[in-house]
Image: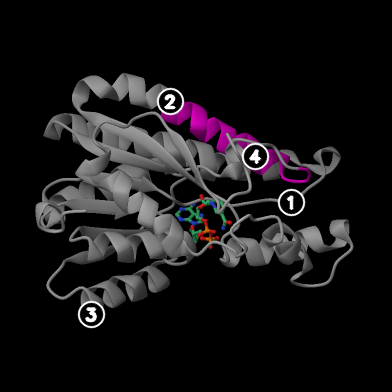
């Protein structure tokens, strides 16, 4: 992508203190964006802010605490960004959680929690960023879906349901927001070695009758390209979605999984 053309653009990345979000924040900073690093965990978000300031020279960065499941936090995140940097060109709704449970065992509290963060948080991002981008005359909203948005997996039903919902939201918002010059797309990673997969590995192990690391390995063994995905693999694709090279693309939830799920 053309770094110069993106120099003064502003991107917000939610859930960016670790994992895929941190990778995206770093990549967008490298691409020349001013990056707002959101997370519920402000201390670690500030560390990412400092890493960005140190590694990307003069580029600006700011950490903002906020829980994406709270509508007021998401609107405040956009407001604070506009106050500090003037606009929001790119909004990456990356924050998300996973759960492992047989369907018979899912509790109402667990359902509420995962839908509040993954689905409600994505809707609030569309509303808050969409409203700002409409005023500006355009922008790009990028949602975190998953291979689980294309194919349901055993024991991951609630997670998969939230990711299918995000794919639906991405398609609907793309059509509603197109008249305002806003594109809406999603990235669908496969098996990325983050804290989320540490959790999945631990929770899936007893069901799969494997030791620590065994569930992760079993999934990675099914990848055609022969290795697990890195946050940088995901961030490269998000970099494209955030750039003008993707201007004619909207409403898509694209799988980037090294060859696991074929659509
Ligand atoms: P992670 O657990 O490593 O990181 C998620 C981040 O989101 C954390 O920093 C966490 O503090 C933050 N967060 C959680 N709840 C939040 C909230 N309510 N408000 C703000 N921040 C919050 O996860 P990851 O693997 O980096 O995943 C990032 C996104 O990518 C998620 O949406 C996930 O569903 C999706 N994804 C991950 C994988 C994978 O293999 N890891 C695969 C497909 C999709």
Crowding near the residue tagged with mark 4, few <14, some 14–19, many ≥20 C-alpha atoms within 10 Å: many
The residue that label 2 is drawn on is 171
The answer to whether the residue labelled 3 contacts the one labelled 1, judged by CB atoms less than 8 Å apart, is no
The answer to whether the residue labelled 4 contacts the one labelled 3, judged by CB atoms less than 8 Å apart, is no
> Which sits earlier in the primary sequence, circle 4 or circle 2?
4
The answer to whether the residue labelled 1 contacts the one labelled 2, judged by CB atoms less than 8 Å apart, is no
Please state if 100 lies on the left or on the right of 189 as rendered. Answer: right
State the residue in front, 90 or 1. Answer: 1
> Which sits earlier in the primary sequence, circle 1 or circle 2?
1
The residue that label 3 is drawn on is 54
Dominant secondary structure, magenta: helix
Mark number displayed over residue 160: 4
The residue that label 1 is drawn on is 100
Quadrant of the image occupied by residue 114 = top right
Whether residue 4 is visible here, answered yes or no, is yes
State the residue in front, 103 or 109. Answer: 103
Camera-nearest label, 1 or 2 = 2
Would you place residue 113 above or below residue 60 in this image? above
User: Can you give x and y, in whole percent of width and height, for residue 216 in the image?
Assistant: 71, 64
Alpha-carbon span between mark 4 and mark 3: 37 Å
Mark number displayed over residue 115: none
> Which sits earlier in the primary sequence, circle 1 or circle 4?
1
């Amino acid at each position: 992508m053309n770094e110069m053309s993106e120099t003064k653009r502003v991107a917000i990345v939610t859930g960016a203190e670790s994992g895929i979000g941190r990778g995206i924040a770093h990549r967008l900073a490298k691409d020349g964006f001013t990056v707002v690093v959101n997370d519920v965990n402000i201390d670690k978000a500030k560390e990412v802010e400092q890493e960005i300031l140190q590694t990307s020279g003069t580029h600006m960065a700011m950490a903002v605490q906020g829980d994406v499941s709270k509508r007021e936090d998401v609107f405040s995140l956009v407001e604070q960004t506009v106050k500090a940097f003037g606009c929001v060109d790119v909004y990456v709704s990356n924050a998300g959680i996973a759960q492992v449970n047989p369907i018979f065992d899912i509790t109402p509290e667990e359902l509420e929690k995962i839908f509040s963060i993954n689905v409600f948080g994505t809707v609030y991002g569309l509303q808050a960023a969409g409203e700002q981008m409409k005023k500006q005359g355009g922008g790009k909203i990028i949602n975190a879906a998953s291979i689980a948005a294309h194919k349901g997996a055993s024991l991951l039903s609630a997670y998969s349901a939230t990711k299918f919902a995000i794919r639906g939201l991405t398609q609907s918002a793309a059509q509603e927001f197109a008249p305002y010059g806003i594109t809406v797309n999603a990235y669908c990673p496969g098996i990325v070695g983050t804290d989320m997969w540490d959790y999945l590995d631990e929770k899936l192990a007893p069901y799969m009758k494997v030791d620590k690391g065994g569930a992760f390995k079993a999934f990675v063994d099914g990848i055609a390209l022969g290795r697990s995905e890195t946050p940088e693999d995901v961030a490269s694709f998000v970099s494209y979605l955030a750039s003008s090279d993707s201007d004619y693309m909207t409403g898509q939830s694209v799988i980037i999984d090294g060859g696991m799920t074929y659509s």
